[in-house]
Every structure is written in C-alpha cells, then in structure tokens.
Amino acid sequence: GVQILVSDGPTVTAVQPFMVPLNLSRTITVTGDYFFNDRLMCEWTDSEGVQTNTTATYLTPQSLTCDCPAKSKEGAVVLEVWTQGIRHSHDQIQLQYKRINVTAVYPRLGSVTGNTMVTVTGSGFVNTPKLHCKFGPYIASQTTWVEDYKIICRTPYFIAYKNHAADFVPVSVTFNDEDYVAGTAEYMYHLDMFVLDWYPKTGPAHGDTTVTIYGDNFVNSSSLHCLFGSKIAYATFRTKTTITCQSPQHSAGSYDVKVS
C-alpha cells in the first residue's frame, strides 16, 4: 500500500553559528527534522515580540539555511520554521546577537616572522573555543581569552609583506569562527630590524648620551625603542637605516645595543 508520513511538523534542534555580531545580515544553518521543500519560511521573534520573516532554503529533511535579520541591539531572537505555509516548529531555539569591537593593540608593531604576543583590547570578547584574532587576512596562531575586554593573540607569519619595510593591517576578532569584526586598531608588520653599529661607543653611567644607531629596516613608530643591556630607551626615527636614543642610567660595564 501507499505509506504516508505523519508528523507534528518541523523540529529545530540547533543553529550554526549560535551567536552573531550586531548590524550583520547573514545566512545561518539550521538543523532539525521533518523539513519539507514546500513554502519554507523562517520566523524570528525578539524579546519585545517583534516578528521578522526571512527566506529559508531547503538542504535536506534535517537541514536548511535561514537568512537572519541584522539587529542593532544585543539580545536573543527565537527561531521557528514554517513549512507548507501552515506547520511550524515550537522549539524556542535562540540566536544570540552581541556587540564586539576592537579598540587597541599593544605592542602596535612586530616582525613579519610573527610570533609576537599582542594584547588586544575592546569589548564583547566571548570565552569560547571559536574566539580568534586575525591580522589582515591571516588568523593568529594562538588566541587566549583574559577578560570580556582583553585577549592575547600570537601574530601569524606574514609572507605577503616580506617585500615591504613596513605595513599596517587591521586587527579583527571573531567569537563564532566565521564573522570577523574590526575596529579602529591597526598593527604594523615590519621586516626584521637589525643593528650594524652605533656611535659613540662609550658614555657616563648616569646616561643621557645621544647615541646614533645604524642598521636597517627601522620603522617610524612611537613603539620603537632601544635596549642597552636590559634597560629600555625610546628611540627617535631618523631614516630607515638610522635612529637615535638617549642612553639610560646604567651601572658601569659593557652592554649590547639592540632595537625593537
């Protein structure tokens, strides 16, 4: 005989991603059961009871995609799926909207070889395995959550910038492994700086000697500094091959001079 499938209508078990940034229209994947390729529709209801209907695209009886509306306020919306124009789910599956922003990074520059630990500050950083940083188009090799407003990212290797002395790239963050959001913060990648020589070679222990350092790939940045042994001194950029530093107070002795 003829078999007829009878069900209580579609069921929704999960959405992916389950959290999206504000002011972003995108497509999400919905999993469940009893989805029919007949007059599908997604219905979103926010906390104030406002409903928005969007397009649904059938994939299989257990999956479909929905266009989710852009929202300007944080909070959750409930998804229900309609099929055949009359039958709908009642599973109360939620999609979270959250504000995320990147406002600053420190240090603000590092080598194209990567492996620099950078503190990224902003807001909306969620402690999840899907939290990641991106420097330009490249994903950080490591991201560590510290607070809702602070994470630490290990910069990736930047092949694309090896032929440039220095380049600024945007820093962006995602909490769902898909939607990266950038703010005003930028990070400078530079070729490895190195020291060839410096003058004068000696100075008083109380410091305050202007030392001219010669090398290559020096960058014009407020984060540029010299190291006299373990003592740090801020550097003044002159050219790509020349900087000056005021020697710090130091105990008498012979010390290496480095630039970073």
Image (cartoon, helix red, strand yellow):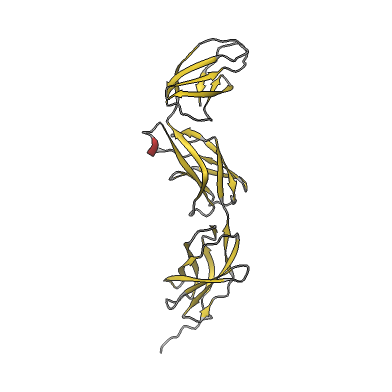
| Residue 172 location (% of width, % of height) | 50, 47
| Residue 190 location (% of width, % of height) | 44, 32
Q: Which of 147 and 50 is in front in this view?
A: 50
Could you tell me which residue is drawn at 54 percent across and 35 percent down?
A: 107
241 left or right of 181 in image: left
4 left or right of 230 in image: left
Q: In the figure, 239 relative to 25: above or below?
A: above
| Residue 186 location (% of width, % of height) | 50, 40
Q: In which quarter of the image is the N terminus?
A: bottom left
In the figure, residue 233 lies in which quadrant? top right
Q: In the figure, 155 relative to 215: above or below?
A: below
Could you tell me which residue is drawn at 42 percent across and 76 percent down?
A: 37
| Residue 72 location (% of width, % of height) | 56, 60
Q: Nearer the viewer, residue 170 or 30?
A: 170
In the figure, residue 3 lies in which quadrant? bottom left
Q: In the figure, 25 relative to 6: above or below?
A: above
Q: In the figure, 88 relative to 189: above or below?
A: below
In the image, farthest residue toward the left? 163
In this figure, what is the number of numbered marks?
A: 0
Could you tell me which residue is drawn at 51 percent across and 11 percent down?
A: 201
Could you tell me which residue is drawn at 42 percent across and 30 percent down?
A: 191
In the image, farthest residue toward the bottom? 1
